[in-house]
Image (tube, rainbow, N blue to C red):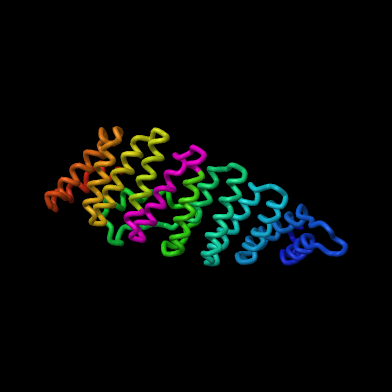
Amino acid sequence: MANSDPDKLIAKADKLTKLSMTRWNADWKNATVLYEQAAIAYRLARKHEKAKDAFEKASKGQEMLSSPWDAAKHMESAAALAKEVGNWNEVSDFYRRASELYIQCGRTACIRCACKGCSIHANFVGKGLPNYVCDILKDEDVAPPCLMTEDALPDEAIQLYTDACAVLEDDGKEQMAFDLYRAATSVYVKLEKYTDAATFLLRWALAADKCNATHSQSKAYLSAIIVYLYAHDFQQAEKCYNDCCQVEAFLNSDQNRAATRLLSAYTDGDVEEIKRAAQSSIIFQS
């Protein structure tokens, strides 16, 4: 069967799933095997469009066979191939569907991976942001093996991240969502939606608090303050700082001292001190 023409495999599988006067029930078991074989053959032949369609059909077959795990894996393969052919709408749709299937089988770790697969690579250096903000937001772990171009469907990517974070939060697995909080924040900053970026950082801080990750919590608070400052919203930055100081973990942290120094420099209008504060080791480590 491995040497069979994949077009013929697809045709045979399609016939098995269609009802007729002589076939009252679809044979998804045998059809799915054929779709999987065809998908692999198309992919090896670098016929990405046909491979994508075959993996989508294989995913449907596994779903009909009550195997959401295999269905999700096939849907991820379809998404990766959609990326190869530049169909970004399908990339978003397929990764979202993969996440939904993982939810059905309780695979929260894979939900995170599926959403990271739809990540937008955020390369901020040279795009107008100061280096210290870039260093706070970028992390090599955010960059997954399947990257969109940075201008492709950012709103859909943010929604995927947000949905995945919600699932992990509901499952009490906030720490598994840390890279997703960071990725969503990075996309918001790239879109110059600074208020949304800061809000997501504060959400990250709350999640960190729930899993006793005090260092990450303080880093997220400091990052939110810096984002407000970069957006030239000193009043909101100061309010954010005052609110964060109500949290003991932040109040006693190195990140608090760095934020205090930075805000004082802004208050005094001391450009040189702002530069020195922004280049401090605490901020670069955040």
User: Is 207 located above or below residue 162 in the figure?
Assistant: above
Judge by depth and name the residue closer to the eye, 198 or 117.
Answer: 198
Q: Position of residue 183 (x, y in %)?
A: 41, 51
Compared across the picture, whether 77 is left or right of 187 comes to: right
Q: Position of residue 218 (x, y in %)?
A: 31, 39
Judge by depth and name the residue closer to the eye, 137 or 197.
Answer: 197
Q: Position of residue 282 (x, y in %)?
A: 25, 41
Q: Residue at the spot x=30%, y=33% of the render?
A: 249
Q: Position of residue 17 (x, y in %)?
A: 77, 60
User: Is 181 located above or below residue 10 in the figure?
Assistant: above
Q: Residue at the spot x=26%, y=35% of the render?
A: 251
Which quadrant is home to the C terminus? Answer: top left
User: Is 26 located above or below residue 255 in the figure?
Assistant: below
Which quadrant is home to the N terminus? Answer: bottom right
The outermost residue toward the right is 22
Q: Residue at the spot x=24%, y=52% of the render?
A: 229
Bounds of the magenta span?
Answer: 168-196
